[in-house]
Image (cartoon, grey):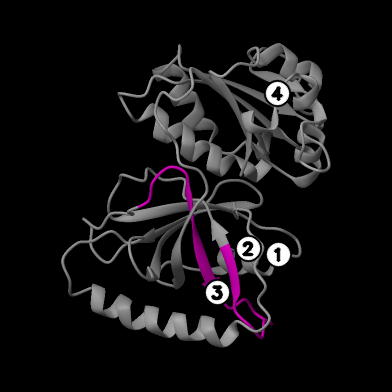
């Protein structure tokens, strides 16, 4: 999914072209250097698509390889990376941030889930890439700095492709033996086929049954047999009242989803309003990616 960031492209095309040219030279140079952190200091440069996998009807998992198998991402939880591309019909380059879904500690490559939108030039361009094609990566964007054991429990609320930064945070917590934070994930989707990373969540629930609970809620009401894990409808006040712990200094809510969903949960002006405000959560207890 594209992480949230607004960038004015008018007047920056020459700068971007210069960055890409410099990044291309840097990429060529990097192939002859010792292993490094790809998203460390300076531009990351061009990375080749290693694998493209269809996840569902509109989402692909794209894996980009690093120059060497022992190269590391250099990213920390929770981060996205800025991409630069030239979709068909675009006069100027398009800049979009995407959130990695692969383990940030795993060397050699990096994975992204990219949802294709009907009018999305960049997402359509990325879906058209074939193994061996390159995509330019500029630099990392730090979204949130996670502190292990800062909270006893956190709630993660995702809508559609907004699951990616929350999944990255879940990985960072559960893959760290020293972090004992407990989590509840509420994942709202249109249909069951829109549930991304379902296998990964099932594995985490089996491996850490006392650490993470996952609840899917399907807005088209296609769930035939409701259960604790599968619900019909949207993310509502009643559902969150059932699932969220009482407000305290030991809990926090992380949120990422479509604008309408976020507005319903936090209010129009991002104050202490919306459903979460009605449930007693203050502004500093909620973080929106």
Q: Is residue 56 above or below residue 180?
A: below
Q: Secondary structure at mark 3?
A: strand
Mark 2 and mark 3 in contact? Answer it, CB < 8 Å: no
Tag 3 and tag 4, C-beta contact below 8 Å: no
Q: Magenta includes 80? A: yes
**Marks 1/3: CA distance?**
13 Å
Q: Position of residue 63 (x, y in %)?
A: 42, 56
Magenta segment = 75-96
| Mark-to-mark CA distance, 2 and 4 | 35 Å
* Placement of 5 over or under 219, stated as above or below: below
Residue 254 position in % (x across, y down) = 60, 33
Q: Nearer the viewer, residue 275 or 203?
A: 275
Task: Kindly identify which numbered label has been placed on residue 281.
Answer: 4
The residue beneath circle 3 is: 85
Q: Position of residue 178 (x, y in %)?
A: 31, 23
The residue under label 1 is 120
The label nearer to you, 3 versus 4, is: 4
From the viewer's perspective, tell me whether residue 225 is left or right of residue 33.
Answer: right
- Horizontal and vertical percent position of residue 271: 77, 37
Q: Which mark is residue 123?
A: 2
Q: Residue at x 28, y 55 (%)?
A: 108
Mark 4 neighbour class, 10 Å CA radius: few under 14, some 14 to 19, many 20 or more: many
Q: What crowding class fits label 1: few (fewer than 14 Cα within 10 Å), some (14-19), or many (20 or more)?
A: few
**Which residue is found at the position 18% from the left and 75% from the top?**
32
Is residue 33 on the magenta stretch? no
Q: Residue at x 27, y 67 (%)?
A: 67
Q: Quadrant of residue 23?
A: bottom left
Marks 4, 1: nearer the viewer? 4
Eye-nearest disc, 2 or 3: 3
Dot 2 surroundings within 10 Å: few (below 14), some, or many (20 or more)? many
């Amino acid at each position: 999914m594209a992480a949230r960031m607004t960038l004015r492209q008018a007047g920056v095309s020459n700068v971007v072209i210069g960055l890409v040219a410099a990044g291309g030279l840097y990429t060529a140079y990097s192939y002859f250097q010792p292993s490094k952190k790809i998203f460390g200091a300076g531009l990351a440069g061009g990375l080749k698509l290693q694998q493209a996998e269809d996840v569902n009807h509109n989402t692909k998992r794209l894996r980009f390889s690093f120059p060497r198998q022992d190269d590391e991402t250099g990213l920390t939880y929770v981060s996205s990376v800025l991409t630069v591309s030239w979709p068909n019909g675009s006069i100027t380059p398009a800049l979009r941030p995407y959130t990695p879904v692969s383990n940030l500690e795993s060397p050699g490559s990096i994975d992204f889930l990219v949802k294709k939108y009907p009018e999305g030039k960049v997402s359509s361009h990325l879906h058209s890439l074939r193994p061996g094609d390159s995509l330019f990566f500029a630099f990392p964007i730090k979204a949130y700095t996670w502190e292990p054991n800062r909270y006893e429990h956190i709630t993660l609320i995702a809508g559609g492709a907004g699951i990616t930064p929350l999944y990255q945070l879940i990985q960072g917590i559960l893959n760290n033996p020293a972090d004992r934070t407990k989590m509840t994930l509420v994942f709202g989707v249109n249909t069951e086929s829109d549930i991304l990373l379902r296998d990964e969540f099932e594995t985490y629930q089996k491996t850490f049954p006392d650490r993470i609970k996952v609840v899917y809620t399907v807005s088209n009401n296609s769930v035939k047999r409701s259960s604790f894990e599968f619900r019909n409808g949207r993310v509502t006040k009643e559902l969150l009242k059932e699932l969220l712990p009482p407000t305290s200094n030991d809990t926090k809510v992380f949120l990422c989803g479509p604008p309408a969903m976020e507005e319903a949960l936090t209010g129009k002006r991002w104050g202490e309003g919306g459903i979460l405000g009605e449930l007693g959560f203050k502004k500093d207890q909620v973080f929106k990616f």
